[in-house]
Amino acid sequence: QVQLVESGGGLVQAGGSLRLSCAASGSIFRIYATGWYRQAPGKQRELVAAITDDGITNYADSVKGRFTISRDNAKKMVYLQMSSLKPEDTAVYFCNVDARTTILVPRVISWGQGTQVTVSS
């Protein structure tokens, strides 16, 4: 089973920056794609950014040019560098990984508990 713990959220003024981190632990054979999602009050969870195990990235149009996703495979960490933050970026941010615990079992999607990001105007 894969456990994910996000950190780095908080309150920041518009135009500021935050760096979110996601630590994966547990019995992990391999992590494939990883991503960051967010959910604002009253809205559906949406993809913010994703990165494959060979480094291909994908971003929501609303964050392109402002957010950068990265990963450290050796440390089993995923990061989201957020810059030029806007009030509309306010949400709970969730880490997501597609991983396999052993070579013999199917890949499983795991989610963290989320970290709150609040951007004040």
Image (cartoon, rainbow, N blue to C red):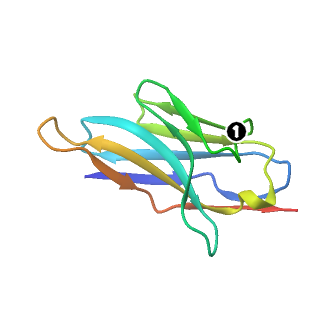
Answer with the quarter of the image where residue 13 lies: bottom right
Image x and y of residue 18, in percent: 71, 47
Q: Is residue 35 left or right of residue 66?
A: left
Image x and y of residue 77, in percent: 46, 38
Up-down: is 21 above or below 110? above
Rendered-image quadrant of the C terminus? bottom right
Q: Is residue 32 left or right of residue 47?
A: left
Disc 1 packing (10 Å; few <14; some 14–19; many ≥20):
few
Residue at the extreme bottom of the image, as rendered: 42
Residue at the extreme right of the image, as rendered: 121
Image x and y of residue 49, in percent: 57, 43
Disc 1 marks a residue whose amino acid type is Lys
Up-down: is 63 above or below 118? above
Image x and y of residue 25, in percent: 34, 46
For the residue pair 58 and 113, the one nearer the viewer reads as 58
Residue at the extreme top of the image, as rendered: 54
**Which SS class for mark 1?**
loop
Up-down: is 2 above or below 92? above
User: Which residue corresponds to mark 1?
Assistant: 64
